Amino acid sequence: MVSKKKMEDSGELILGNIIKLTRSSEKKFKLGNFKGALEDKIKANEILKYKSCDEKIIEKYREELSNLYSSKFDLIFDHKLKIDAIKRNEIVQMLERKSEEKLKNHDYRGAIKALRRAEKYLSN
């Protein structure tokens, strides 16, 4: 049986990896390395969708996204306040599909921009 301490350590390690990849993606995006930014973002999302990510990890990740994407003029934040969770999830799924389409066309800039926009809808 796995101890609670080991599970917490594992969760912290997973969260640390997700945050490291997210920050790396953001840095690469700002430097114009859209393909590298997209690769890091995809890795972070794969880890997040893995079954070992519990609600606590996801909540801390959302806090990190809020810190990364905070801005005085955030139209997505304003829009999030006016829509419910179902509509928010529909928008996120649509943006993720758009990102996949852009990736198929080797439009790395468009793909990473769509994923970043989706993350803004997920942040707190």
Image (cartoon, rainbow, N blue to C red):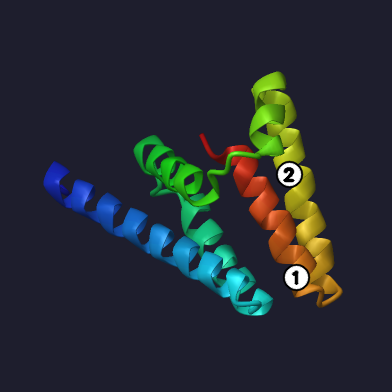
Q: Secondary structure at mark 2?
A: helix
- In this orientation, which residue lies closer to the viewer: 9 or 67? 67
Residue 91 image offset from top left, x and y in percent: 76, 38
The image quarter containing residue 100 is bottom right
What residue is drawn where x is 35% and y is 37%? 56
Q: Secondary structure at mark 1?
A: helix
Residue annotated with mark 1: 109
- In this orientation, which residue lies closer to the viewer: 34 or 43? 34
Rendered position, 67 above or below 31:
above
The image quarter containing residue 55 is top left
Residue annotated with mark 2: 93
Residue 24 image offset from top left, x and y in percent: 47, 70
Q: Residue furthest front?
A: 72
Instruction: Name the residue type under label 2.
Output: Gln
What residue is drawn where x is 38% and y is 49%? 52
The image quarter containing residue 39 is bottom right
Instruction: Name the residue type under label 1.
Output: Arg
Rendered position, 117 above or below 33:
above
What residue is drawn where x is 43% and y is 47%? 64
- Local packing at callout 1 (Cα closer than 10 Å; few below 14, some 14-19, many 20+) is some
Q: CA distance from mark 1 to mark 2?
A: 18 Å
Residue 22 image offset from top left, x and y in percent: 48, 61
